Image (spheres, helix red, strand yellow):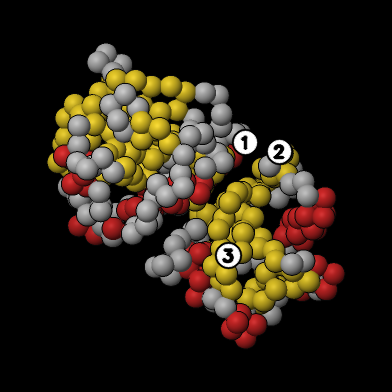
């Protein structure tokens, strides 16, 4: 692990370091002065006090709704369920009508409560604290409700499921080098990468999930090749003596016509040249995926390269 001095901090790298803390995902909502609903996605949610009942979230000063939230009478925190990734993405995007065709109701203080969430807290403003490039909103809970559904999790820039096992989260958050890869299937074909030096076949991978817009990590690598994907859930987490590996099942969103001229290419299930894949564990994982794809029933693997546990996806 490399220590970093404050004067050497890189903003993106610090964000990645903060991202090692596994959290839930919330959508924070309020009404503007005209009664129009407003909201944003946040994982900076923390309980503060039981007596009095206080919680906090933080909002970036540059956020489109910052002035609305700081001027409002209160806000609500909606903790998302595992099935609500689309809501998280919707409220994280800028420049869209986030409440279009969305089912919600007003809490006692007026803030929107979204349907299907794991828990919600309706708050009045207790205090606002200036904190660098963010403002901390401390709310006093006036009403709340919750259920036993599985919450949506977030760690290292990607969604995870708290419904699997704490062992997976422990492995994801433990120190050491992490390699992130994806199995991306489309119409009976799997995306594989040709090694630029020895020509062997690999699953596309990088040192982080990254971001398509910035060109970083796995998503950036795929985006530069004209491939846009979503990473809905983790398919395997394992480790060896030197590093940890996490492989996602990727959902193909769009693809450029130029893909076939690049090192990343789709290979039909029945025409994969297995002898060109040098890693026996990758071969085993791909063979398992092909079987489970045909059955329509997936399992998640957690362990090392030789021994582990399977959990229903």
Q: What residue appears at the point 45 percent right and 61 percent down from the top-left corner?
A: 210
Labels 3 & 2 near each other (Cβ < 8 A): no
Q: What residue appears at the point 50 percent right and 58 percent down from the top-left corner?
A: 209
Residue labelled with disc 3? 253
What is the secondary structure assignment of the residue under circle 2? strand
Q: Nearer the viewer, residue 283 or 279?
A: 283
Image spot of residue 227 (x, y percent): 56, 71
Labels 1 & 2 near each other (Cβ < 8 A): yes
Asked whether, in this view, residue 184 is left or right of residue 172, the answer is right
Q: What residue appears at the point 73 percent right and 44 percent down from the top-left corner?
A: 299
Comes first in the chain, label 1 or label 3: 1
Q: Which label was assigned to residue 311?
A: 2
Quadrant holding the C terminus: top right
Image spot of residue 288 (x, y percent): 79, 53
Please tell me whether residue 275 is drawn above or below residue 57 in the rendered image: below
Residue labelled with disc 1? 164
Answer few, some or many: residues within 10 Å of disc 1's Cα (few below 14, many 20 plus, some between 14 and 19): some
Q: Gap in Å between the C-alphas at discs 3 and 2?
A: 27 Å
């Amino acid at each position: 692990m490399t220590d970093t001095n404050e004067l050497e901090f890189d903003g993106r790298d610090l964000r990645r370091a903060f991202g090692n803390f596994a959290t839930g995902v919330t959508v924070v909502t309020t009404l503007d002065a005209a009664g129009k609903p407003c909201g944003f996605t946040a994982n900076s949610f923390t309980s503060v006090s039981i007596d009095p009942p206080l919680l906090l979230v933080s909002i970036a000063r540059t956020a489109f709704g910052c002035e609305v939230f700081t001027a409002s009478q209160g806000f609500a925190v909606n903790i998302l369920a595992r099935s609500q990734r689309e809501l998280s993405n919707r409220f994280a995007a800028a420049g869209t009508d986030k409440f279009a065709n969305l089912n919600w109701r007003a809490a006692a203080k007026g803030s929107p409560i979204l349907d299907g969430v794991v828990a919600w807290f309706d708050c009045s403003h207790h205090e606002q604290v200036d904190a660098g490039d963010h403002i901390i909103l401390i709310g006093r809970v006036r009403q709340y409700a919750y259920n036993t559904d599985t919450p949506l999790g977030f760690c290292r820039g990607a969604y995870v499921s708290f419904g699997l096992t704490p062992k997976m989260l422990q492995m994801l958050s433990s120190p050491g080098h992490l390699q992130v890869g994806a199995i991306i299937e489309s119409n009976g074909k799997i995306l594989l990468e040709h090694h630029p030096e020895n020509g062997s076949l690999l699953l596309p991978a990088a040192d982080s999930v990254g971001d398509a817009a910035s060109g970083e990590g796995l998503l950036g690598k795929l985006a530069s090749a004209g491939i846009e994907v979503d990473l809905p859930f983790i398919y395997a987490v394992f480790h060896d003596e030197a590093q940890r590996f996490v492989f996602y099942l990727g959902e193909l969103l769009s693809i450029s016509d130029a893909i076939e001229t690049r090192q990343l290419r789709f290979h039909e299930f029945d025409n994969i040249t297995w002898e060109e894949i040098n890693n026996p564990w990758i071969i085993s994982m791909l063979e398992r995926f092909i079987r489970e794809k045909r059955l329509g029933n997936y399992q998640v693997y957690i362990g090392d390269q030789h021994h582990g546990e399977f959990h229903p996806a």
